[in-house]
């Protein structure tokens, strides 16, 4: 499916995108930049083909010290931070709970959930609460349904959804809005981390009969980042091809 190149009014906005070297993070970074935002992407490894309009910073989002330093430096270099997208994530192992090791469980939660707290906490130290700001967290429909064989991932994404709801309420009287996006299967490299039978079972749950694309996630993120989305916060925005039932 081909989507036209849309743009949104993000002129003058200053954005940090974690997991920016990944396919979803990269797609969000590109549409933000095309819409006028100044963008810095965070990842463990520099992307092979970063666009010249994007800044890159190596950050371990599971390390609170690394995150705090990076956010302060980003605010200094960009001139502030208005937009934060938490897109860093891993699927973790596909196995039953009885077969998980504590280390596997902890790593999956650290990357997918605890990093969202670290980055959001750091962003709130530098965001101007009287200025239009956005924190957008990439969750998953697994956080609603609970995928068997993916308990750690499901639990982490459920935590991202609840965190976003709570933070949105806390910031309700400010100009900072908080959102989570809950995709179903998206055509990225993460699919290759999953067991093929698990992928097939999840495809079968999507009424539209296909996976989403990183660009479709980016389109929703860009609208959420814009002033066009003004009377919504603490919300979960499904991107599931009809799979989500609540």
Image: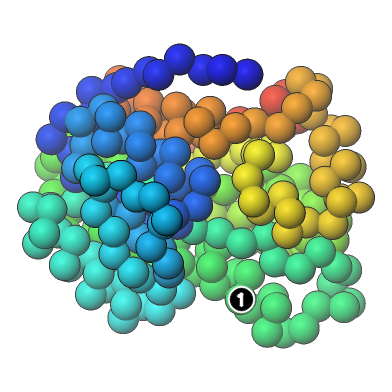
Residue at image point 29% right, 59% down: 56
Q: Classify 226 as above or below 154.
A: above
Q: Is residue 214 left or right of residue 187?
A: left
Q: For this rendering, which residue is in front, 112 or 40?
A: 40
Residue 21 location (% of width, % of height)? 44, 54
What residue sits right under mark 1 in the picture? 107
Question: Element under label 1?
Answer: helix
Q: Classify 182 as above or below 197.
A: above
Residue 133 location (% of width, % of height)? 24, 41
Residue at image point 32% right, 21% down: 7
Q: For this rendering, which residue is in front, 71 or 21?
A: 21
| Outermost top residue | 4
Q: In this view, does 33 lie to the left or right of 162?
A: left
Residue at image point 63% right, 19% down: 1
Splitting the image into 4 quarters, where does residue 141 fall?
top right
| Outermost front residue | 49
């Amino acid at each position: 499916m081909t989507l036209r190149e849309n743009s949104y009014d993000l002129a003058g906005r200053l954005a940090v995108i974690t997991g920016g070297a990944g396919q979803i993070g990269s797609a969000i970074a590109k549409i933000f930049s095309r819409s006028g935002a100044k963008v810095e992407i965070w990842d463990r490894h520099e992307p092979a083909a970063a666009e010249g309009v994007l800044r890159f910073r190596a950050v371990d989002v599971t390390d609170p010290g690394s995150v705090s330093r990076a956010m302060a430096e980003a605010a200094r270099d960009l001139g502030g931070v208005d937009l934060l997208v938490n897109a860093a994530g891993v699927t973790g192992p596909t196995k039953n709970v009885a077969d998980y090791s504590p280390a596997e469980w902890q790593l999956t939660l650290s990357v997918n959930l605890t990093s969202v707290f670290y980055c959001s906490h750091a962003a709130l130290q530098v965001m101007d609460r009287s200025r239009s700001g956005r924190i957008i967290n990439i969750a998953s429909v697994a956080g609603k349904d609970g995928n068997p064989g993916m308990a750690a991932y499901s639990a982490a994404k459920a935590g991202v959804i609840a965190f976003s709801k709570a933070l949105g309420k806390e910031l309700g009287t400010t100009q900072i809005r908080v959102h989570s996006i809950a995709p179903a299967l998206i055509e990225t490299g993460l699919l290759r981390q999953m067991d093929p039978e698990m992928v097939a079972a999840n495809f079968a749950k999507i009424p539209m009969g296909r996976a989403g694309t990183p660009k479709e996630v980016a389109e929703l993120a860009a609208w959420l980042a814009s002033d066009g989305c003004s009377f919504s916060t603490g919300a979960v925005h499904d991107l599931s091809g009809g799979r989500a039932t609540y």
